[in-house]
Image (cartoon, helix red, strand yellow):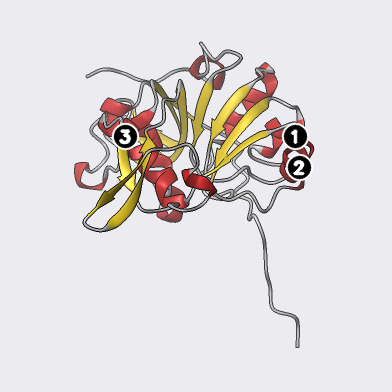
Amino acid sequence: MINKVVNNVQEALEGVEDGMTFMLGGFGLCGIPENSITELVRKKVKDLTCISNNAGVDDFGLGLLLHQRQIKKMVSSYVGENDEFERQMLSGELEVELIPQGTLAERCRAAGAGIPAFYTPAGYGTEVAEGKETREFDGKMYVLEKAFKPDFAFVKAWKGDTAGNLIFKGTARNFNPMMAMAGKITVAEVEELVPAGELDPNEIHTPGIFVQRIFEGKDYEKRIEQRTVRPKN
């Protein structure tokens, strides 16, 4: 069985260059590839196109890359928790493509399934459809959306084995399985790395065939994007 393990995050990110397109799993701050993002900041790669549901917060997640002006274009669904993102977008420093969340997910899934494009009703008649092909099916209008073409996909899993099989935990699963399928090179960081054969095959969410590099991460913060509590009585 092929061993996909690399020694550390530095080895996992070999080949990363300026101007590349990256997918980064996560939803809010849940299930984001923290170690990979930190290494991208350290490497100072720039002019990046980043595909992720959102852009983290000002001092964590993709917000760290934004503060260093490393992201040229952000392709996202929701970006409401990041003041620096808002500032760069409104000033014209950052190119932004906002996509309906379901369309974002399907463009990831289509890339992994080898489907070059698909029709969806989401966004028809809005700015989302501007410049795109539209077509009628059974009396309803649809917009043609193209699959993504990322150079790397960075995902975070709860457990993984040396063959690259992944298990995600709870809502940290989110966009990670779809993005793991889509990258030319998929890098998986896991909280716990075990020998091949130790994971229950019935519990595996992403088969190792989609993963090229895997490593055991460290120092995960597990932060909450926005905490709301009830006032004391």
Asked where in the image residue 45 lies, by quadrant, the reply is: top right
Mark 3 sits on what residue? 117
Q: Nearer the viewer, residue 56 or 128?
A: 128
Q: CA distance from mark 3 to mark 2?
A: 30 Å
Name the residue: 64% across, 39% down: 61
Is label 1 in contact with label 2 (beta carbons under 8 Å)? Answer: yes
Mark 1 sits on what residue? 92
Name the residue: 33% across, 28% down: 164
Q: Secondary structure at mark 1?
A: loop
Q: Secondary structure at mark 3?
A: strand
Q: Nearer the viewer, residue 102 or 146?
A: 146
What amino acid is found at the position of numbered circle 3 in the picture?
A: Ala
Name the residue: 69% across, 41% down: 60
Mark 2 sits on what residue? 90
Tell whether 27 sits left or right of 108.
right
Q: Position of residue 2 (x, y in %)?
A: 26, 17
Q: CA distance from mark 1 to mark 3?
A: 29 Å
Name the quarter where the C terminus is drawn: bottom right
Characterize the local packing of mark 2: few (<14), some (14-19) or many (20 or more) Cα atoms within 10 angstroms.
few
Q: Secondary structure at mark 2?
A: helix
Q: Nearer the viewer, residue 146 or 70?
A: 146
Of mark 3 and mark 2, the one earlier in the sequence is: 2
